[in-house]
Structure formats: structure tokens, C-alpha cells
Amino acid sequence: MTVSPASLASGDLIGVAAPAGYLVEHDRFHLGCSLIRDMGFDIFEPEKRWPGYGYLADTDEARIEELHRLWSNPEIKAIFSLRGGFGCLRLLDKLSLEVIRAHPKMFIGFSDITVLHNHIVNETGLMCLHGPGLATLADTDQASQERLYHCLKGDWSHRLQERVEIVRPAAPAKGILLGGNLSSLVTMLGTRWFPRLQGTIVLLEDINEPLYRLDRLLTQLWLSGVMNDIKGVILGQFSDDATEPVERLRRNEFVWARVIELTSDRAVPVWGNFPIGHCRRNLTVPLGVPATMDSDTTTLHFNEE
């Protein structure tokens, strides 16, 4: 059963966690904080600003303590991830699901945050928001920022009707929406924390991986058997906006073709070019909720049983 966190009201306090990579551009962080304040919310900024620990924001102990502290603080109404990178996998065996169950709240992010999102959804039923991290929020377009605002205010179930590529049309498909970053999801394979994907609609995106690595990641995901009983596939962007348009199209079309091959024995719908990923248009979507893919109208509906 889906657990819906409380929506935010004007003036509510939002915490910032860095469970993965370190802060690269401090000005992007401050711009993100300003945008959240412009939306009418307040930001709880940590006194100690993630000192960095190699390629991580801090030690494993400090990062998990920060998550638990923010989740258990009743004044914090939602938690934004700072950014992706790597590091969430190292926290899975330390994450307290009891703390999360006791204090359900919105948890927003993408990229490496996929690891935490899917584990939390799978084990607690808590809906999480796949959307911009705080350090990337200022790089997104107005539509993405408006969508995020409405999701924070509780209107996350509003349908998304987008100009997507219908790679394989099919009858409307229904299932719980899961997934996120392809590389991060594949790192969970073989662990006891990999989410149950049976009966789900799987969302996938990535950034600037060479074609052979995309092939390897997709092939491993499907050959592992975890995708055997999925209901549909939604493919986002696989490049950033700095990539030449022709190369972006080539990369996307390669992924589309490979997914069609991997799903050739089942007639599940496959969409491409969905506006999520490491790009300016990164629309927030709820993970862990029932969703319906309507290929006739290119509409993704949420919270429909």
C-alpha cells in the first residue's frame, strides 16, 4: 500500500541531505535555496557544510546520521537531496527504516538517489519524488520548477501529458512506478536491497554513458530476470544538454532499439524521450504510486487503481 507523505504548506521547513557526492558548485546550492524560498518554503541549512570525503560528501557515518537526524526532526517537513554522484549504496545496510516509517515525509532527488528511493519505496511503501536535487534545481527550466512546486504542495498525482516517443505502442498499462537512474539501479543487482519490479512500470535515465556501457547495463538488467514481469518501460534522457543534438538523438535511439530487443517476447509499452534526467527539463514524478501509461494520448496518469 502506498504511503503518501503530507503535502507542504507555505513557510514549511525543508531539510537538505547529501547522501552521495560532495558539493561541487556552492553558487548552484545557494541558487537552489533561493528558488525554494521563492516558492514560499524555508530551508534548514546545516551548520557544517559537507566537508567532503574523497568523492563523497562526508563519511558514511556522518551521511547516514544526517539522514536520520533530518527524518526524525518533526520541524523538517521534507528532505531535498543535495545532488547525486555516488555513495547511497554504501548507506543501505545502515539506513533505519523504522525512523522513516515513524516520520513519513517527502524525499526529493534523482541520479544516485535512485538507490535510496527504490529501497525506501519497496520496504516502507512511502512515495518518493524523483526530481531535481537542490544543487541542480537552478539549472532546470520553468516547467520543471513549477511541476516541483505543485508536487511539494501535494498535487503530485496530476497527470503528465508530454510529447514522448511511442517506441512500442500497446494497450494502457498499469503498475507501480519505480526506477530512476539506470547505472544506480544496476548497482543494486545481487544485493538484498534490490526492489521488487514485478508488475511495475520502470522508469530509466542516465547521463553520457558510452553506448557499449548502456548496452551492458541494459543487458545485465534484463538478463538478471528482474524485468521479466514488468508492465511498461519509460525511458528518459541519456545525455545532458551540453551534448550535441545529433549525438543525443543517436544515444536515445540506441537505447530505444536495445529495449525493444530485450522486450521482444512481451508486448509491453515502451516510451522514449520522457522529460526526466540530467537535463534542463527534469519533471518531478512520484515513485511508489500506481501509474497508467496511455500511449494513445501520451499521458502518464498517477494514483489510479
Image: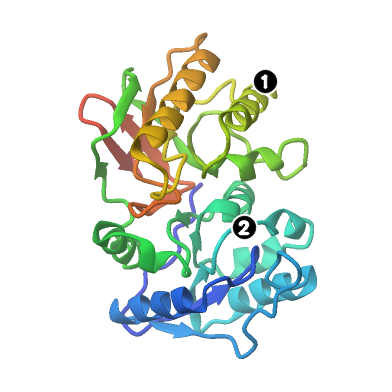
Which amino acid, by three-letter code, is at mark 2? Answer: Gly
What distance separates the C-alpha of mark 1 from that of mark 2? 26 Å
Question: As drawn, is 4 to the left or to the right of 228?
Answer: left
- The picture quadrant where one finds residue 217 is top right
Location of residue 106 in the rendering, given as x and y in whole percent from the top left corner: 47, 65
Mark 1 vs mark 2, foreground winner is 2
* Residue occupying the point 58% across, 56% down: 113
- The disc label shown at residue 223, or none: 1
236 versus 286 height, above or below: above
Q: Where does label 2 land, which residue? A: 85
Q: Observer-nearest residue: 210 or 156?
A: 210
Coloring scheme of the render? rainbow
Horizontal side, residue 252 vs residue 119: left or right = left
Q: Residue at x 37, y 28 (%)?
A: 271
Tell me the quarter of the image containing the C terminus: top left
Q: Is residue 125 visible?
A: no
* Residue type beneath disc 1: Leu
Q: Where in the figure is residue 78, as x and y percent of width and height? A: 48, 72
Q: Secondary structure at mark 1?
A: helix
